[in-house]
Image: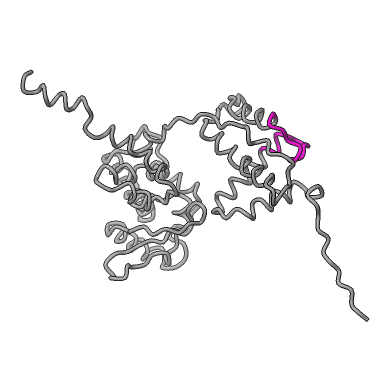
């Protein structure tokens, strides 16, 4: 007697719940866990906005109204999202509907996000950097606190890591080059989980070795959350009496700006920061050109002799 084989029942696109669709979408995107967390939050926030409406029934008007609601000042919380933040919240929706409407997936009959334009974002990040003296003040305050805090600040400034990469960094990620002359860090948790190699300056490595004696030689280098690192930098900013809104990401911008100012090539900075496209790195060129000698300086030099 032949034993019957029970085949699993496959759901059609119509039978899939929104929760199942979102889970499949997130499972197919090989991003860092922080990116996936942000994607999940953005989608859940949109679902809260549309209420009982299914994701497949959403129209472009729903997404446009959602965008306008984000751009509108929230009087209860006394804040207004920036255009950059709104773009970040819309990006997961655009990816979700593009994926779900693709011929191979077909979870959605149409892509309502295709016609939604992102709000205009000004390139204010070009000014999000510290001067050499401001970096010194921040690091001095961190050095007055603990070995750990100073090591965190020095790592962010010298390696230009994202804060998510910093808290994911493990001692085993460090290694020497084939000649045994330099220390390198394999950054494993970059965007898209793309590994890259970053050279560790002697100043930083010596500081990390001091900290390692205190903290231990295995596991994560800095077993902290991203929010804890942000608070450490914010506290140092306050003690240094800096008016700038310094964040760990500002130190990443500072790394790129100081590197280019002191002779690093765009390709070197791109490799260190882990930018997929050189265009992302080129945004720092405008800042560097402003800081370097400008046209009025040449005119002044010309007139100094006669004035």
Look at 61% across and 32% down and name the residue there: 116
Look at 54% across and 29% down and name the residue there: 119
The percent coordinates of residue 297 (x first, y second) are 18, 27
Look at 33% across and 38% down and name the residue there: 285
Q: Answer with the quarter of the image where residue 72 lies.
A: top right
The percent coordinates of residue 291 (x first, y second) are 26, 34
Question: Which color scheme did the rendering employ for the protein?
Answer: one colour
The quadrant of the image that shows the N terminus is bottom right
Q: Answer with the quarter of the image where residue 112 lies.
A: top right
Q: With respect to residue 248, does 271 lie above or below? A: below
In this view, the residue in front, 7 or 240, is: 7
The percent coordinates of residue 142 (x first, y second) are 35, 48
Q: Answer with the quarter of the image where residue 230 lies.
A: top left
Q: With respect to residue 216, does 266 lie above or below? A: above
Q: Residue furthest front?
A: 103
In this view, the residue in front, 300 or 10, is: 10
The percent coordinates of residue 187 (x first, y second) are 43, 58
Q: With respect to residue 297, does 159 lie above or below? A: below
**77 displayed left or right of 236:** right
Q: Is residue 190 magenta?
A: no
Q: Which portion, as a residue range, is magenta?
A: 46-61
Q: Main secondary structure of the magenta part?
A: helix
């Amino acid at each position: 007697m032949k034993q019957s084989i029970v085949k699993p029942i496959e759901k059609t696109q119509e039978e899939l719940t929104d929760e199942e669709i979102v889970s499949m979408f997130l499972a197919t995107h090989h991003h860092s866990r922080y990116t996936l967390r942000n994607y999940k939050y953005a989608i859940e926030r949109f679902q809260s906005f549309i209420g009982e409406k299914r994701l497949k029934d959403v129209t472009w008007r729903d997404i446009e109204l959602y965008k306008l609601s984000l751009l509108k000042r929230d009087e209860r919380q006394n804040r207004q999202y920036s255009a950059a933040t709104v773009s970040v919240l819309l990006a997961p929706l655009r990816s979700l509907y593009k994926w779900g409407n693709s011929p191979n997936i077909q979870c959605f009959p149409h892509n309502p996000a295709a016609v939604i334009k992102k709000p205009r974002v000004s390139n204010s990040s070009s000014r999000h950097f510290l001067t050499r003296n401001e970096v010194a003040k921040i690091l001095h305050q961190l050095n007055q606190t603990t070995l750990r805090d100073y090591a965190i600040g020095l790592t962010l400034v010298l390696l230009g890591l994202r804060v998510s990469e910093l808290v994911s960094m493990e001692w085993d990620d460090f290694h020497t080059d084939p000649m045994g002359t330099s220390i390198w860090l394999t950054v494993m948790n970059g965007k898209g989980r793309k590994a890259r190699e970053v050279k560790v300056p002697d100043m930083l490595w010596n500081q990390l070795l001091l900290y390692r004696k205190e903290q231990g030689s295995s596991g994560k280098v800095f077993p902290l959350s991203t929010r804890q690192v942000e608070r450490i930098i914010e506290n140092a900013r306050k003690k240094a009496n800096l008016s700038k809104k310094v964040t760990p990401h500002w130190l990443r911008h500072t790394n790129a700006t100081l590197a280019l100012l002191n002779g690093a090539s765009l390709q070197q900075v791109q490799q260190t920061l882990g930018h997929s496209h050189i265009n992302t790195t080129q945004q720092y060129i405008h800042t560097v050109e402003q800081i370097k000698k400008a046209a009025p300086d040449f005119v002044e030099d010309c007139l100094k002799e006669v004035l």
